[in-house]
Image (cartoon, grey):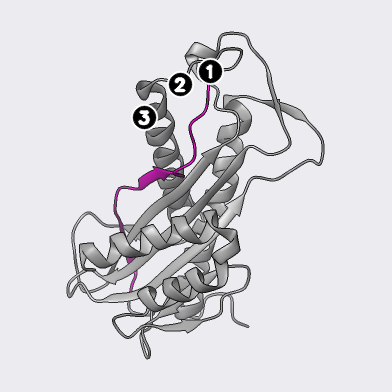
Amino acid sequence: MNAIKCARIVALLAATFLLTSAFAATKADLEKAMSYDGLQKITIKDIDLVFARPGATLAGYNQVKLEPVDVAFRKDWNPKVPGSSFKISAADRESIRTGVAKIVYEEFVKELQNKSSYKLADEAGPDVLRVKVKIVNLYVNAPDTPSAGISRQYTVSAGEMTLFAELYDSETGEVLARVVDRREARGSGRLTISDSATNTGEARSIASVWARVLRNGLDKAHGIGKK
């Protein structure tokens, strides 16, 4: 996908979920950007937006080339170290960003390797589906950093993040589908302690949902699970 178009979609995603008063107009712009090269909107249960190339199928793909995951924070995320007035360090921000990228990648690998027969590929090939995942608008309500010491933080939810994924034919580079889905961490309805364990658990839970969507799409195309 053209890098300029990709950047446009990411920018629209940020605006869509930040500027709620202008949601309708911004969402319309987002849908236009996602379909610029002929993709058409389809419906997948519990997923916000999916656009697919008419006539395209995943039936011919038995391997997946999963690209490294990119992560970007929400523009207004600028947390402080618990118990102080200092902002968290650049090193802590980078640790959170790379940590989430690793978690999302691992959950996709786990779903494809342990719960299906699809192989992970390192190179392009006629039966290789290339998957590029970006996490945007990452917002961690209570980041647990080394500099936080023994301070305890209480939140109703760990935070939120949005998936932007593209599926390509690995040989031709043709985009087969684009997916956007925003997820919030599960809320208990009451204040609970937030730490690295709860933040990691919630990130894995969200990523596993997205990974299942990909695996289910491949299974459906291959007729797996049909009686």
Residue found 41% across the figure and 28% down from its top = 93
Please give the residue where the numbered disc 3 appears in the rendered image.
94
Question: Residue 152, located in which quarter of the rendered image?
Answer: top right
* Percent x, y of residue 25: 51, 73
Task: Give the residue type that dot 3 points to.
Answer: Glu
Please give the residue where the numbered disc 1 appears in the rendered image.
81
- Please give the range of residues in magenta: 61-80
Residue found 40% across the figure and 39% down from its top = 102
Tell me the distance, in whole angstroms, between the alpha carbons under discs 2 and 1.
Answer: 5 Å
Crowding near the residue tagged with mark 3, few <14, some 14–19, many ≥20 C-alpha atoms within 10 Å: few
Task: Give the residue type that dot 2 points to.
Answer: Ile
Q: Give the SS element for disc 2.
A: loop
Q: Is residue 218 above or below residue 199?
A: below
Q: Is residue 42 magenta?
A: no
Q: Nearer the viewer, mark 1 or mark 3?
A: 1
Residue 118 visible? no
Q: Is residue 12 above or below residue 146?
A: below
Tell me the distance, in whole angstroms, between the alpha carbons under discs 2 and 3.
Answer: 10 Å
Residue found 26% across the figure and 57% down from its top = 121
Q: Is residue 64 magenta?
A: yes
Crowding near the residue tagged with mark 1, few <14, some 14–19, many ≥20 C-alpha atoms within 10 Å: many
Outermost residue toward the bottom?
Answer: 55
Decide which of tag 2 and tag 1 comes sooner along the chain. Answer: 1
The disc label shown at residue 88, or none: 2
Task: Give the residue type that dot 1 points to.
Answer: Val
Q: Nearer the viewer, mark 2 or mark 3?
A: 2
* Percent x, y of residue 144: 55, 22
